[in-house]
Image (tube, grey):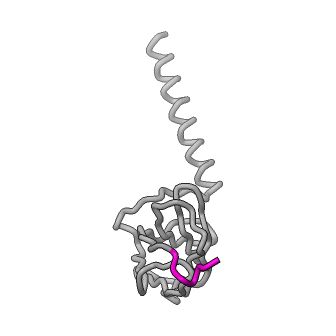
Amino acid sequence: MNKTFQYISLGVSTAFLIGIGLVIDRIGGYGIRTDDVSSSVVLSVSQPVLPGVPLTVRWQGNQERDIDVTLRLISGEEVLVLGTGGLLVEAMPVVFPCALPPAPFRLELIDTTNRAILGVMPVSILPPGPDCVR
C-alpha cells in the first residue's frame, strides 16, 4: 500500500507541474531579464547616452521576418518605453528622458506581440546636460 501511494503522489505531482507549465505557456508575457551576451539580437548605441540628446539605438542578429518590436529602458524601479518599430529596420532614434529613475539601467528589445525578449544591453547614462535645464 505504501509503494502504491508513493507512485500515485509522484504521478499527481508530475501532472500538476506540467499543468502549471502549460498555463504559464498559454498566458505568455514571461521572460527572464538578463544581461547575458547570448541574446539573439545585439544592441548598440551610436554615442554616449546623455539625457535629452537624440541618439540612435541599433541592433543586429538573426532577423528572419519583420515583427513589431518595442525598445524599453529598465531600471530597478521603472520600465520606460523609448519607442516602437520593426525588427528589420535595425535602428531606432530615441531620446532618453531628463527625469530618470535611479541606476543601474539596461535596454531591452522585445517582441511586441508575444513579449519575448530579443536583446538586452546594459547602459551607462551620463548626468543630464544643458538640454535638460529646467
Query: Considering only vertical position in the picture, is 35 above or below 60?
Result: above
Residue farthest to the left, as pictured:
37
Residue at 55% of width from left, 36% of height from top? 15
Residue farthest to the top, as pictured:
1
Q: Quadrant of residue 72?
A: bottom right
Viewer-closest of 3 and 28:
28
Residue 85 location in percent, x, y?
60, 83
Q: Is residue 65 magenta?
A: no
Residue 94 location in percent, x, y?
56, 83
Q: Quadrant of residue 43?
A: bottom left
Residue 101 location in percent, x, y?
57, 62
Viewer-closest of 129 and 120:
129
Residue 1 location in percent, x, y?
49, 10
Q: Quadrant of residue 70?
A: bottom right
Viewer-closest of 83 and 128:
128
Residue at 63% of width from left, 48% of height from top? 23
Residue farthest to the bottom, as pictured:
89
Viewer-closest of 83 and 132:
132
* Quadrant (top left/top right/bottom left/bottom right) for the C terminus: bottom right
Q: Is residue 39 visible?
A: yes
Q: Is residue 66 visible?
A: no
Residue at 41% of width from left, 85% of height from top? 47
Q: Is residue 133 magenta?
A: yes
Residue at 56% of width from left, 77% of height from top? 96
Count the labels in the image. Answer: 0
In magenta, the rendered stretch is 128-134
Is 40 on the left or on the right of 80, as rendered?
A: left
